[in-house]
Image: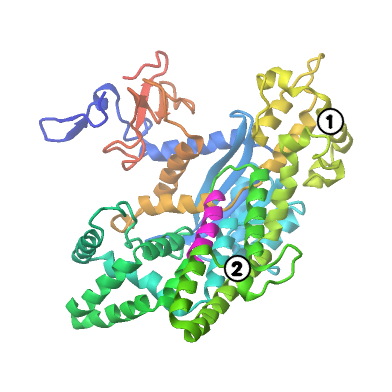
Amino acid sequence: MPKWNCSYDSARRYRAEWEKKFMLVKYAPDGSGEAAYFVSPTLKQELKKELGEKFTLLVDESTDVGTVKYLCIAIRYCSKKEKRIVTEFVGLIPVNDTKGEALFTVIKAAVTNLGLELGNCIGFANDGASVMTGVDNSVWTRIQQESPDCVQVKCICHSLALCVKHAFEKLPSCLGFLISEIPKWFSKSTVRRAAYKQLFSIMDPTEERKGTSLPFQQASQTRWLARGKVMYSILMNWEELKAYFMCAEQASGADARYKARMISDILNDPINYWYFHCVTPIVMEFEGVNSYFQATDADPQSMEGELAQHHHSLRARVFSPDESELAISEVDFGARFAMKVERYIEMHQVSGETKVQDVKARCYNFLVEAIKQVEKRLPPTRNIYKGLSSLDPSKILSQTARVPYKDLPFPTLRTHRYNAIEQQYRNVLHINWVEEAVFDNKIPDDSVQFWIGVGNCYDTLGNKSFIDLATYALSCLVTPVSNALVERIFSHATIVKTKLRNRLSTRTLDAIIRIRTHLHFRVWCYNAEYNFDLFFVAHEKNYIFYIGVQYGGHCITRCPGGGLTNYVALVYTDRQSSKPL
């Protein structure tokens, strides 16, 4: 069936083709209100049934468009049903008091409501704000009292963004002015954009630079990957921007002429061009690592390797292999930077060399500050990933790479079954796992899948030989990668609650976010033709509810109309026949 086939009824109302096959439920059958109010509690009940004993929490706070401050809580646990580690939305809770004690009370109540004990929390991920992580009177200090074995995971993405922010303060302020004001100049004017595109095409008649990103994307404090992209687009359009603002200074009105002149003067100074050539690759390197850690699930060994490689790459620019500090003339500022400054020195001799030394000194300070920030902010988190990397199959099954039993991470998780886990840790090395049926002749590279398979390995008596070791390893691997997932939930909330819908109640917002995130996190509704994804039980006697129904290979979770405000389609069927009405 074509995805967007539709027709109109006698009242000129839109009717999609799939609506002829499926009946959209706008209200719950028992008359309790909109269908979202029925679905959301059902999903929460399913979450309660599925939760394991050990878990980690991901927490952050934000203010929506209606100036309501919310605390968002997500939970990460090992799902026996799905045989993988799952991250699930717990709730979007309005808060007025944002002190550590008040936020802790809200978090503890949410955990208790799920039937869990905070003492079983082994990880607490947050954005690093003082109210969350402070040494006195914070949320973290109170969680430690409840769960002494819990570890704190400060968001790597936030930390990397702060490293770049503090390092940038060592550079001239005019660079920040360019990054901010050039995209603003084009942001709300189609005339200016059209004029720039026309100039770009004139300066590139052979279309050799076709596909070059234009300098229209704006930088943002809340978007971790924006600064590098903006800097790169400005650098790639430097000559065109010089020509454009030279013309804009003459053509603009009195209110904009001064800004155009300032931007033009900065662009015409070759020193600023050198700064961009030196700094842009470094910022993009930071953002490359940042994007890696925005994954919901990532292998601990790969994460530790990424951080180590990034740190070594930065230090190698400034320090020699024996850790002695290099002279400024020997520091690696980048090949393009070196080419530009050498050409300038050849043209301007002594005066040019003086300017180059000043620029190198500022760039050197930028690099040193970036290294200091990385070494200040990342080691605790890196140590966590380094410990978790010891559970990687390549190390566990290696005689030389495996760590001693006493050095495995989270020793408190082994307390109750210490001897049994130690014996199983010895024995796991002597099994030919390739021949085990649970792995189908191939040992998985993913740590989670490996330990799930190990936990399902039976001996000749029908007992699970390594269940204690596997349970311990999976409990460790529940540790979150970063807090990026909670930021995505806030992005969902921003899409749902807009300026035009700023009176949306907390109950409705929470229900919609729960359904959206459940579909997103569980990867429902993606494939199979004429496939029904049933994932929660019937309501009353005669109804089974489906979310994420597909027909003819097309997803219809974003259908027009309906009680879920255009986000989820609900279809009900007869319970006995299980065929759509």
In depth, the one of 225 and 410 nearer the eye is 225
In depth, the one of 104 and 28 nearer the eye is 104
- In this view, which residue lies farthest toward the bottom? 351
Q: CA distance from mark 2 to mark 1?
A: 44 Å
Of the numbered discs 2 and 1, the one sitting upstream in the chain is 2
Q: Tag 2: residue type?
A: Ala
The structure residue drawn at horizontal position 71% and vertical position 23%, both measured from the top left corner, is 456
Q: Tag 1: residue type?
A: Gln
- In the rendered structure, which segment of residues is drawn in magenta? 279-293
Q: Are marks 2 and 1 in contact (CB under 8 Å)?
A: no
In depth, the one of 181 and 56 nearer the eye is 181
* Prevailing secondary structure of the magenta residues: helix
The C terminus lies in which quarter of the figure? top left
Q: Pointer 2: what residue?
A: 370
Q: Name the secondary structure under disc 1.
A: helix
Residue 66 can be seen in this image: no
Q: Which mark is residue 424?
A: 1
The N terminus lies in which quarter of the figure? top left
Q: Is 367 on the left-hand or right-hand side of 201?
A: right
Where does the image place residue 473, in percent across and percent down from the top left? 74, 38
Where does the image place residue 343, in percent across and percent down from the top left? 45, 73
Residue 120 drawn in magenta: no
